Each structure stands twice: as C-alpha cells, then as structure tokens.
Amino acid sequence: MPPLPLHLQSSARPFIEVDHFDFWYGPKQVLHDIHLAFPENHITALIGPSGCGKTTLLRNLNRMNDLVDGIRHRGDIRLDGTSLYDPKVEVISLRKRVGMVFQKYNPFPKSIYENVIFSLRVAGRNDRRQLDEVVEKSLRQAALWDEVKDKLHESAFGLSGGQQQRLCIARAIANRPQVLLMDEPCAALDPIATLKIEELMTQLKDEFTIVIVTHNMEQARRVADLTAFFYLGKLIEYDETLSLFTQPSQIQTEAYISGRFS
Amino acid sequence: MSDAHSNPPSSAALLSSKGEIKVWLTATGLNVGLFMVAGLLLLITWNGLSVFWPQPVSEFTLTSEKDGAPEKIAGIITKQKTRRSAATGQAIEEIQIFTGNRDAYGLAFRFLDQSSLASTTLPTDYIVAERSEYGKAIFTPVRLEFSPTQSLLANDPTFLPELHRLVKEGNDRRAEITALEKHEIGAINARIDKLEIRLRKADPSPEARAPLEQELATLRSEYATLAAQATTLRDRQKIEKLVYRLASGEERSQAVAEIIHFYQPNQLTLVGRFKIFLHHALAFLTEEPREANTEGGIFPAIFGTFVMTLLMAALVTPLGIIAAIYLHEYAKPGIMLQSIRICVNNLAGVPSIVFGVFGLGFFVYGVGGYIDHGPAYPLPERWWFLASLGAVVTLILALLLTLKYSPTQALQPKSKARSFTENSLWISTALLTLLTLAKCPYFHGFFADKLPSPTFGTGGILWASITLSLMTLPVVIVATEEALSAVPRGVREAALACGASKWQMIQRIALPGALPGVMTGIILAMARGAGEVAPLMITGVVKLAPSLPLDGIAPFIHAERKFMHLGFHIFDLGFQSPDSEAAKPMVFATTLLLIFLVVVLNLTAIQIRSHLRRKLQASAF
Ligand SMILES: Nc1ncnc2c1ncn2[C@@H]1O[C@H](COP(=O)(O)OP(=O)(O)OP(=O)(O)O)[C@@H](O)[C@H]1O
Ligand SMILES: [Mg+2]
C-alpha cells in the first residue's frame, strides 16, 4: 500500500495509488519505482526539473500513454481500489472518470458550446436542456461564463489563449469526472488568468481529486495541499506543501526549490 | 579587411560567389515555361472566342472572267499569308476566305491570290445564315415565296421582320419534331421493346398471349399516330421558300424553316455584334451538334463530361477516404504499410490507357458480361455447393473467433498464431463468397432477353466512371492522408481524453478537420478525370451519342449508355472529321471550354487549400 504523507493518514482517503510503478518508452526507462498515493478531494502538485517524468506519470493515470508505441510498465496504479490495468476496465470509461487538461491548450475546431459538451456527445447524451445546463455550469466553474455567454455558438478559436485554456478546463469537468489531471495549465497564461485558474482549482477540489504539474514554485505553494518532488524519474520527496517548501528533508529538494539547481 | 580592399575580386568571381548566375538561370527557365503556357492559353482563348464573333462579309471581284462578266465571290477572310511560288520563286500574297454555301460550291473554303483580285467591297445587304444542313450560307436575299403564287420581294420593308418570324416558327416546329421523335416516340419504343421481350418469354397458350398482344397493338397504333404527326410537321417545314442570290449571280431556293439563325454582318453595330457573339456562344453551349459535329453546339459532350465526372467523384470519394483512414489511423507502421504507400503512389504514374485496358477487360467484359448473361464458366453444381458450404463454415468460424475476443482484453496483444488464423479465415470467407457469386450455375444474367446485343457488357458511362475513379484513387488517398496528418496531435489526444473512442475521435474531430484537404483532393481528382481521354475511348465514349445518360424515361439514370465527352470531342473534331478546316473553330472553342473547366476546378481547389491553411493558423494561436 503506497502511503499518504503522515499528517493526512487519518483524515483523508487515498484515491489514486501508484504502487512501485516503473515505466519505459521503448528501451528507455522514464519512471523508477514510483510509490505514492493521491488523497481524495485534495490538490497534489508534481514538481521537478524538465524531463524528470511528471507528464509521463500524469499520462499514465488516464492511460493516455497507450497511444504511444513500444511502451512497457511494471507495478500497478489503482483508482479507488481497482487497478487501471484490470482486464475488466475499459479505457474509455476510465477516461470518463479521469479528466485531463493539457500543457498546451487544445480546443476543438468547433463552437464554444460544442467544445464544452464534447464528452457528453460522445457518451450519446443529446438532451438539449441537459446540455444547456451542463454548458452553463461548467463555464461558470471555469470562470468563463460571463465572457462567452453571448457567443456560445461562435468558434472557440476566437477566444484569447487564457480563455481557450479555461475552455479546456470547462470541457474536462463537463461530465463530472472524479479526478482532474492538469499538466502545467498556466504555462501559457498571463498572471491574471493564472490567478483565475488557481481560484478555480481551489473551488473544484471539494468535488474532484486534482493532480497538477507545475514549474511555478509559487503556484505550488499557493494551491497545492501536497507536493511531490521528482528527479530523473524518481520520487525524491512527497509531503505536505508547507513542510516540503520550508523544511525539505532531501538536499536535492532543497536545491531545487531554492533555485540552486544545476 | 585591408586585404579585401587592396585586392578586389573580379566581377565574375563576385557574381558566382553570390550565386547570381544560378539565379538568372533558374529565372530564365521559369520565364520560358511561363511564356509558353501564357502563349498557349492566349492562342486558345483568342481563337476560341473569335469563333463566335460575327465577321464582315467581303465581296471580291476577280480579274478572271466567267460567262463574259468578271467573276465575283463573297466570303469572310479567315487567313492572310505569303507563299513562295514554286514556279517563279516570287512571294505571293494569298488569302483564305470562308465562302460557306457548301451545297453550291462543294467546299466551304477557298484560297485567292491577292494579284487576282480586281476589287474588294463590303456590300451591306449580305446575310449570313446558319442552316440545319450544309452549314452556313452567305447570300443576298431575293424574295420569300409563301406559295407558288404569293411572294414578298427583298426590298419590301416587311421582308426582314417576315423572315425573322418564319425562321422562329421553323425553329419552334423543329423543337416540336425533336420532342416528338426523341422523347415520345422513344418512350413508346422502349415500351414496345419490353413487351416484345415479354411476349417472347410468355407461354404459347393464346389466353396468356392475348392481353399482351392487345397492348402491343395499341402501342403500335399510338406509335403510328405520333409518326404521322411528325411527318405532317416535317412536310409543313418545306412550304415557305427563300430565294437568294450568290455573289456569282446564281439564284437558289431554300426552305426557310431550315434556317436556324441569320444576321446581316455588314450592318451590325458593335452592340449588335456583341449580341450575335453571345447568341453564338450560348448556342454552342446549349445545342446539340450537327453535321458530323462540325456545326451546332456541344451540349451532350458537356453534359456527358459533367455526369461522368460527378459519378467518378461519387465513387472515388468514399473509397479513397476509407482507404486513407485505414492507412493513416489504423494500419501498423512497418514494411507492409510502406510498400502499400509506394504502390499507391506508383498507381498515380501508371499510363491512363493501361487503366482503360483494365477497365475494358475487367469491368466491361468481365463484370458487364456477368450482369448481362451470368457467369461464362459456371462451376459444376456439386462443386458450387461445396464452395458455398465452405463460405458459410469459414464465416461462422471467423465470427466465433473474432467475437469471443472481448474488447476489455484489448490490452494483451493477440497471439500471433491466433490473429493469423483469424485473418486467414476472413480472407478465405471473402474468397469463397466471391467464388460462389461469380461462378453460380443458377444465375443467367439480368439482361439475358436482350442478348446477343449487350446491355452492360459494352462500354458505358458507368464503366468509364469506375475506370477513372480507379485511376484517380491515389490522388484522393494521398490528399486525405496528408490532411489527416495535418490535424494536430493535441486535439486528437484531447478528444480521447474526453472519453471518445478512436472511431469517434476520427469521425468527430479528425475527419472534419481534414475535410478541406479531402475536398482539395477530390477536386484535383475531378480535374484530372475531366481532362482524361485515352481510357474513356475504350470504355464508353462515342463520337455521337443518340441519347443522354440522364433523361425523362424510366429509370432516368442510364448507367449503361454510351456518352460524349469534351476531351474526346476535341480529338474527334480535329483528327477524325472529314473537313478538318471546317472543324477547326469548333476544336478551339471546345478546347477553350475544357481548359476553362479544368482551371475552374483547380482554382476551387487552391481556394479551399488556402482557406484550410488560414484555419489551421487560427488554431495555432
Ligand atoms: N513519446 C515519447 N517517446 C519517447 N520518449 C519520451 C516520450 N515522451 C517523453 N519521453 C521521454 O521521457 C522523459 C520524461 O518526459 P516527460 O514529458 O514526462 O517530462 P516532464 O517532466 O513532463 O518534462 P517537462 O517539465 O519539460 O514537461 C524525457 O526524457 C523524454 O525524453
Ligand atoms: Mg511535461
């Protein structure tokens, strides 16, 4: 059983458990024996230098890496107690439970409305009233409703970069997944949009279990309850955000968060 | 640095070091190419359009005499050139004139030496008339004869309006005759044919035959009534006569109703000329050809090209898109896929006549013959039963094997042996099914009654379209694959992350995104197909088709009919017609139209592509 950090062990339930997980792209091992659990209704931040495998871990949580040829894994990942690799688990229904926001915003070449309800459409839900409700609720939660409510049926490409990223967030939460994976959601955004998305994450955590990858220490500090530090494909340290930033137990962690990293 | 100043390089070295010579060379190459293309287009446009422009008629008085008076001849100057005389070596100015009146002169063109001309005038009263037979006539009118006793002289002020009226009446009556003969009589003929076939097959008892024979008799009498109507109309056409005089002084008489259209070229204002020009152009586009295609319009060829191209696009689009989706989205990359891609690309380079030969052998004789009279070499019944049994058994086995594999297990790859058996079972099912269908001893064709005259077993618009769609398939496949790879990976992943299956992702995100590129491919394929001639010549194009592939007689679409085509029309006019000089204007006009068609298609494709590019840029930021 992968452990939660000490202080949470009584108060929170581990929702995603990554159990001694190794991962290879072809011959190259990218993740080494990752062993940790993400608590329900908390925000966990993954930090670490570029290329250390944060995105790879995240993409394994909804089996997005299945698309890549020549991958291999060892160990297990469990969602709410069931292994993702259980033969009975269908990838499609898994991805409905685990929403994802990508590092680079990628709205579909469709209207704003159709973008938000895409996951409902592919699930075969077409009831107009229901769809309208979902669109409004998701866009409100993504703090975008007031800006787009008059142009729902215009192309999503007419929005600014920050708005497009918030649209992608609305799209990811539209069918109420249990987990929300966010890969550097603010990398392309200005400080104001970043702030809006951070606010949004704090609101959403009552409903979702959130895992976020970020390069921005301040952001991790502001929004994350827990932070995991990765280095060269290994999990170096995993703790409550405040203690990880104030009293890191590993020297690599300290070097990284203080910016003295070579 | 001081070195460079003290020792300036020679200008040639400077040039070559900057590569400027190469720039000039490439620019020259480009210019030569552009110049040639522009020249060709200009030549065709000029010649093609001038066909429709009404030119003045000159009257030439020759120095030679005929019957005691100087010989006169009237015509339109078509060419002026100098020729070196074979005898004296002197340069001789020569003109070519279009005299028309093929019925009187035998030829429509004549060459005259400048030196033999005494004078040239432009008399105003000449009329150029287009007739339904013998081409154009150029003459001065003398009188209209309404009946042997009643006539109207040409200098009467009501002469021209009266002539206009009669010509119009004649045209209306001709249209009526065509409608009668082509459509009504044609429909009755089709019904009579069907009845006769039924009668042939019906059992010989008189009770069974009586109603059929009764019906046949009614149809025959209907036919006779219609035919009589047509004959009356035809006779009516001959009543009014126009008497006219040629430049030589000879007077001739001609049924007014045979004149299709006339004008007085030497009295026309610019606007009048322009009106005649438009009239000619319109007639060219909408009328049927006359006189071995050298006169009249090319409507059936336009229509045939259009229908053939659309049919081809309708066939090649689904096939190409499905193939491209499989190649790009599902097929495993590897040697197999590579070699298939190479084959597809090479298919685009196969000479089109090879496709034509294949189409003739496989589609026309093979499939068409099968449709007509069933398999040529059916299996013996016992073997056929075995084959169909085999097909059913392999189908059941293949289904069992495939369906027992639940999609939840999709992660563990199938074992090699298992997927091999599965594939070979499916393939043998397909082969056995084909065999049972193609060799069925109980099938004797859908059109066996009409044999020995073939229905589908001869060239036709369907086979021509299928052959061309095979030829243009690579264009669509390559364009679709390119368009699919232009759909950003991020968008595809986003769709999958939203819980879409792979097929939903392709259908809702990848294909709509690729649509403009796919459209470009289809239009390019259409442009290529529309301009193709060689494969069509052996799969269904004819010089003169009796009827269009689409018409009002059930079943409306006649996929087995032969058709006319612009490209073949050019070839036929220019190189197969008895009077190539007379056909030349039509060749230019038809070429202009075909080039126009292909250019319009290509421009549309370019427009769509740039639109696509703009759209993709929008998605990048
Ligand atoms: N599709 C792939 N095929 C092969 N190797 C890959 C692939 N994707 C990532 N890698 C490799 O895996 C390693 C980890 O990549 P990953 O994208 O997980 O890093 P990251 O921590 O997200 O980095 P960044 O912060 O720059 O996004 C890198 O060394 C990378 O080269
Ligand atoms: Mg990353």
Image: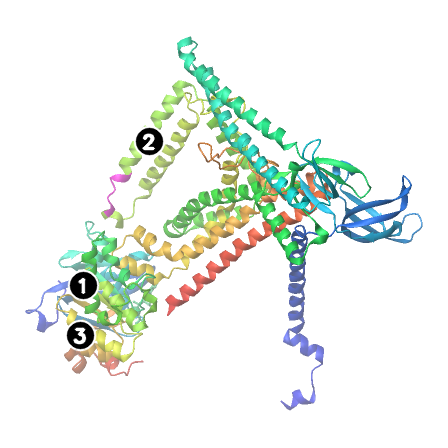
Q: Chain of mark 1?
A: A
Mark 2: amino acid: Thr
The residue sitting at 17% across, 78% down in the picture is A244
Q: Which residues are magenta?
A: B402-407
Q: Which label number is shown at residue A224?
A: 3
Could you tell me residue B401's position as x and y percent?
A: 28, 37
- Whichever of callouts 3 and 1 sits on the residue coming sooner in the sequence is 1
Mark 1: amino acid: Val
Cβ of mark 2 under 8 A from ligand 1: no
At numbered mark 3, what does the secondary structure look like: helix, strand or loop? loop
The residue sitting at 67% across, 66% down in the picture is B28
> Which residue corresponds to mark 1?
A179
Tell me whether circle 3 and circle 1 mark residues in contact (CB < 8 Å).
no
Q: Chain of mark 3?
A: A
Could you tell me residue B557's position as x and y percent?
A: 46, 36
Farthest right residue?
B88
At numbered mark 2, what does the secondary structure look like: helix, strand or loop? helix
Mark 3: amino acid: Ala
